[in-house]
Image (tube, rainbow, N blue to C red):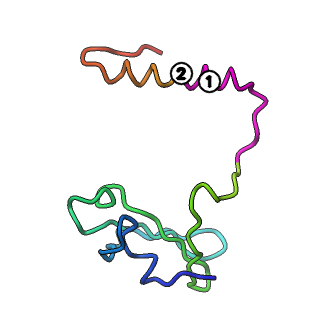
Amino acid sequence: MSATWEEASRCPRDGQFQGKVTSRKPVQGGGQLITLICPEDNCKYHEMGWIVQTRSDGSIPDVTPPDQREKFFPRTSMSSARKQMVHDALARQVELEQRPGHEVHG
């Protein structure tokens, strides 16, 4: 199935506003990646925007929710305990970076 431009170009937050195209980038094999922003100032998609992909024939793939997308990164042999240690270290780094007057040294 394919989405229509009308559906894909609506703001992902609530679909109330039609997005404004800010850039178009060709992709290998045809088609484009089109970046849009929401015209509503108080919407998070006004700043960060969203991307709509078009195929070479102009059709638009249906949106697949992130938790249902195929993963393209390799599995790691890292243990669960090691993964948790890395996660905790990154969380601590973010905490330190956000404290006034603190610096994180590499």
Horizontal and vertical percent for residue 8? 46, 76
| Amino acid at dot 2 | Asp
Q: Disc 2 marks which residue?
A: 88
SS under mark 2: helix
**Magenta residue span:** 73-87
Horizontal and vertical percent for residue 104? 40, 16
Q: Nearer the viewer, residue 22 or 68?
A: 68
Q: Is residue 75 above or below residue 87?
A: below
Q: Disc 1 marks which residue?
A: 84
Question: Quick one: which residue is furthest to the left in this view?
Answer: 41
Q: Is residue 20 above or below residue 88?
A: below
Q: Nearer the viewer, residue 106 or 89?
A: 89
Q: Is 90 left or right of 27, judged from the image as shown?
A: left
Q: Is residue 48 above or below residue 101?
A: below
Residue at left offset 42%, top offset 63%:
50
Horizontal and vertical percent for residue 87? 56, 26
Q: Is 100 left or right of 103, judged from the image as shown?
A: left
